[in-house]
Amino acid sequence: MDICVITNDAVLARFIVLELQEAGYKACSSEAPTDAQLYICDLDYTNNIPEDSICFSYDEGKRGQAKNFLQRPIDASKLKAAVAKLLSDPTMTKIFSVEVDRVSRKARTEAGEVRLSEKELKLLAKLCETPMLSREDGAKIFGDGESNIVDVYIHYLRKKLAKVCDGETVKSMRGEGYTLSDSLNIKFT
């Protein structure tokens, strides 16, 4: 999820979510923080705001509580501009927590789950163990087969992880091999 709107005002939350969805963002509303990349928080409802949030309030005096403040009633164009500015900031990288069950071979995030093949699971585990996996080392996982088998299973793994994580999941480093994206936090159970 790109954006989570935190407020107890259902009408306002729906307005903000619809405006952001119309602008092409994935947005939802909640009364508690989720695993979103950006939060839009109602300061009249909560003081527990994540860093780099966009905050809004009727009370102009609350402007000092947030770096990014919008006065209510919210102007949709100002909201969209603030969201675009923050989400285009290269320091705003969303971290995806991926829980991988070794027995069922299921990889889960808040967006859903995918089932990995045994070879995809072995490859993912090896990627987690080493900062850079060469094609040759990856081929050893598959019984010293040809090194292009690694490319094939990296492709399958990327495709499956893309269903539950946004953005790049496995990076190709020309002449070196493969590494996991910094946006993934993988935990095996």
Image (spheres, rainbow, N blue to C red):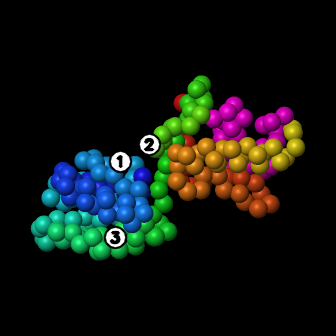
Q: Quadrant of residue 49?
A: bottom left
Identity of the amino acid at label 2? Glu
164 sits left or right of 8 in the view: right
Task: Say which amino acid is labelled 1.
Answer: Thr
Image side of residue 141 versus residue 89, left or right: right
Mark 2, residue position? 110
Q: Given this view, does label 3 or label 2 mark the residue nearer the observer?
A: 3
Q: Residues within 10 Å of mark 3 (few under 14, many from 20)?
A: some
Residue 130 inside the magenta-drawn segment: yes
Instruction: Check residue 80 in the rendering and tell me which mark sits there, or answer none.
Output: 3
Relative horizontal placement of residue 120, taking residue 77 as reference (left or right): right
Q: Which residues are magenta?
A: 116-143
Closer to us: mark 3 or mark 1?
A: 3
Asked which secondary structure carries label 2, the reply is loop
- Relative image position of residue 123 (x, y in whole percent): 70, 40
Which type of secondary structure does the marked residue at label 1 adopt?
loop
Q: CA distance from mark 3 to mark 2?
A: 25 Å
Q: Position of residue 1 (x, y in %)?
A: 42, 52
Check the image and report above or below for 61 versus 42: below
- Residue tagged by mark 1? 34
Give me the C-alpha separation between circle 1 and circle 2. Answer: 9 Å
What residue appears at the point 56 percent right and 33 percent down from the top-left corner? 106
SS majority, magenta: helix
Q: Amino acid at mark 3?
A: Lys
On screen, residue 53 above or below 123: below
Say whether disc 3 or disc 2 marks the residue closer to the N-terminus: 3
Contact between marks 1 and 2 (CB within 8 A): the answer is yes
Q: Residue at x 39, y 66 (%)?
A: 23
First reached walking from the N terminus: tag 1 or tag 2 = 1
Up-down relation of residue 165 to residue 176 (above or below): above
